[in-house]
Amino acid sequence: MSQRIAVIPGDGIGAEVTDAARAVLDAVCRRHGIDLDYDEYDWSCDRYLREGTMMPTDGLAVLRPYDAILLGAVGAPGVPDHVSLWGLLIPIRRAFRQYVNLRPVRVFDGVDSPVRDARPGEVDLVVVRENVEGEYSEIGGRFDRGHPEEMAVQESVFTRAGVSRIADYAFELARTRRRHVTSATKSNGIVHTMPFWDEVVAERAAAFTDVRWRGEHIDALAAKFVLQPGSFDVVVASNLFGDILSDLAAAVAGSIGIAPSGNLDPTRTYPSMFEPVHGSAPDIAGTGVANPVGAVWSAAMMLDHLGHGAAARDVLGAIEATLREPGTRTRDLGGTAGTREVTAALVDRLDG
């Protein structure tokens, strides 16, 4: 029986890397006899400029029956970022209870990290970001617009249910890895939400006595990501802290162009969404140099989520092999290949 995938290429390089991911998925599905059925939607900033909305009013209802969503990128010059994100990406995450944003980070053979002590085989971590509440709430507003007294208020929202479930996910994930969780906090400066976060994480940790854990203030933690990147296994963080830490970790790994993510509903009540984290990169869109690895790795995460673990491992193996050679690495990683060449190399390895 086929599994249905909604594809949203989005903006900028989104279409290019989504095409690459689709080609790799086709190859690995041939190899493993997997049947995926795709429908593509042109929901994007271009659509916003034409019609005034990023997606149609029934967009969430359209997506609801799918098994997964594959997203390319969102954002374009001329459309404010808060308009593009709150018009597409964030409503999908929240309506479909995708409360886990999963962002794995590795230093691969052949990829030079800008950090001296970040070596292949030693840096292998996962940032587990709370994805639907925290600092990215909708509560707040602007007052006295245009006047000298103008002010903006933004409220953070941390619920016991929200912190408990993301902590549980992190601890359960650590059990499948090296059994170590680091919790990002700032309870010495943020007086209500962060002590609450710490208390709930500690409560949940009591059920996972086989997993070591510690809390780290976000400023010290960011420094350790650079100075001691190999010391981390699973890092659990609030929406804002997780967003920042995962991009920092991707830079430590050599390029944000290889960074994948999954927006997961662990209950599988709703479709989960998979996307590279590099953004739409309008400055290189259409030039053929975009790194497709982040999108391809995201597609591998999608396969694993859909129950095709062996196929996901094959895609990751192909990524590892192509990254070892300059001729099959893009320029952001010190190679000479363009998007098409990397995609062709990945497909060849899976078809071989």
Image (spheres, rainbow, N blue to C red):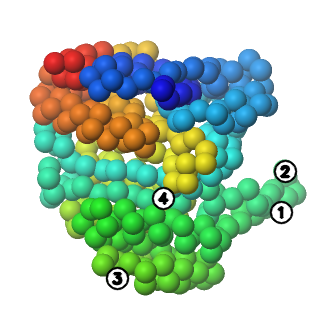
Q: Amino acid at mark 2?
A: Gly
Q: Position of residue 133 (x, y in %)?
A: 63, 60
Q: Amino acid at mark 1?
A: Glu
The secondary element bearing badge 4 is classed as strand
Q: Residue at x 33, y 66 (%)?
A: 174
Q: CA distance from mark 2 to mark 4?
A: 36 Å
| Circle on res. 129 | 4
Q: Position of residue 181 (x, y in %)?
A: 35, 71
- Along the horizontal axis of the image, is 230 left or right of 210? left
Q: Earlier in the sequence, mark 4 or mark 1?
A: 4
Instruction: Look at the picture and state if 228 lies above or below 298.
Output: below
* Cβ atoms under marks 3 and 2 closer than 8 Å: no
Q: Residue at x 70, y 36 (%)?
A: 60
Q: Around disc 1, counting alpha carbons within 10 Å, would you say few (fewer than 14), some (14 to 19), or many (20 or more)?
A: few
Q: Around disc 4, counting alpha carbons within 10 Å, would you say few (fewer than 14), some (14 to 19), or many (20 or more)?
A: many
Q: Earlier in the sequence, mark 2 or mark 4?
A: 4
Q: CA distance from mark 3 to mark 2?
A: 55 Å
Would you name the residue on which mark 3 appears? Answer: 209
